[in-house]
Each structure stands twice: as structure tokens, then as C-alpha cells.
Amino acid sequence: MNSKHNQYRITIEEVNTKADRELQTLTFEIEDREDMFEIIEKMKQGSSLDEQSATRLGLSIRLLGPMMMQDRKHPLFADFMPHFKEFMQNLKKTIKDQIKGH
């Protein structure tokens, strides 16, 4: 991993399930040029979403966005990429305007 990037370990834990199977856990590591905690905090401040939704949005964008940018010509992403780009531009403007207005 590149030391210029932030490194994260993400763990997802199942908290309830049917009685006939064990709870599952998934852990993986990623690196990101952005500070995920800072992005999530900005989402909480400027998105007008509740705290949990803002956290989910900030995390999901940082998981999906860089992967899509890296593989933007992949058939899975090609049709979605223009829409994602527009969504991100609007989101960034909204967050910036909301934080500035406070």
C-alpha cells in the first residue's frame, strides 16, 4: 500500500440471523487518497441526512467511486459513470453550500 494514501480496515458484522446458522463477519482493507472520516463528517454536517444515513453515504461513495474511476470503461460501470459523475458534482456542491451557510 502506498504511504501517501490513508489505509482502512472495514469490518461488517451480522448482528442477527436465523437460529440455524452462525453470525457472519467480513473484513477487508483498502487504501484511499481521501480521509474517510473527514468525508463522513462533512456528510453529517451538510447533507441534511440523519447521522446513520450520512455515514452510510460517505462510506459507500468512497468504496464505489475510486473503484469505478479505476475501471470506468468496464462494462459494469460504463453506463452508470456519467450519472455518478453528475451525482458527485451535485453532492459536493450541496455539501459545500450547506457547510458554508452554517
Image (cartoon, rainbow, N blue to C red):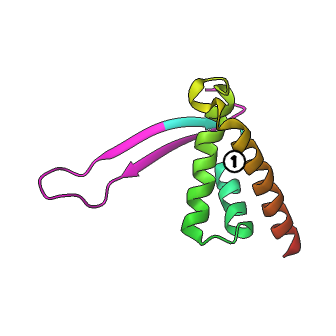
* Quarter occupied by residue 78: top right
In the rendered image, residue 61, in percent from the top left (x then y), is placed at 63, 47
Which residues are the magenta region? 1-28
Name which residue lies at 19% across and 50% down.
22
Name which residue lies at 79% across and 55% down.
90
The three-letter amino acid code for the residue at tag 1 is Asp
In the rendered image, residue 65, in percent from the top left (x then y), is placed at 65, 40
Q: Is residue 57 magenta?
A: no
Q: Relative to residue 86, is residue 78 depicted above or below?
A: above
Q: Is residue 62 visible?
A: yes
Label 1: how many Cα within 10 Å (few below 14, some 14–19, many 20+): some
Q: Relative to residue 19, is residue 29 depicted above or below?
A: above
In the rendered image, residue 47, in percent from the top left (x then y), is placed at 71, 66
Residue 58 appears left or right of 94: left
Residue 83 appears left or right of 67: right
Residue 14 appears left or right of 67: left
Q: Relative to residue 29, is residue 93 depicted above or below?
A: below
For the residue labelled by badge 1, is the local secondary structure a helix, a strand or a loop? Answer: loop
38 or 43: nearer the viewer: 43
Q: Relative to residue 48, is residue 27 depicted above or below?
A: above
Return the residue at label 1: 35
Name which residue lies at 58% across and 60% down.
55
Most distant residue in the left direction:
20
18 or 15: nearer the viewer: 18
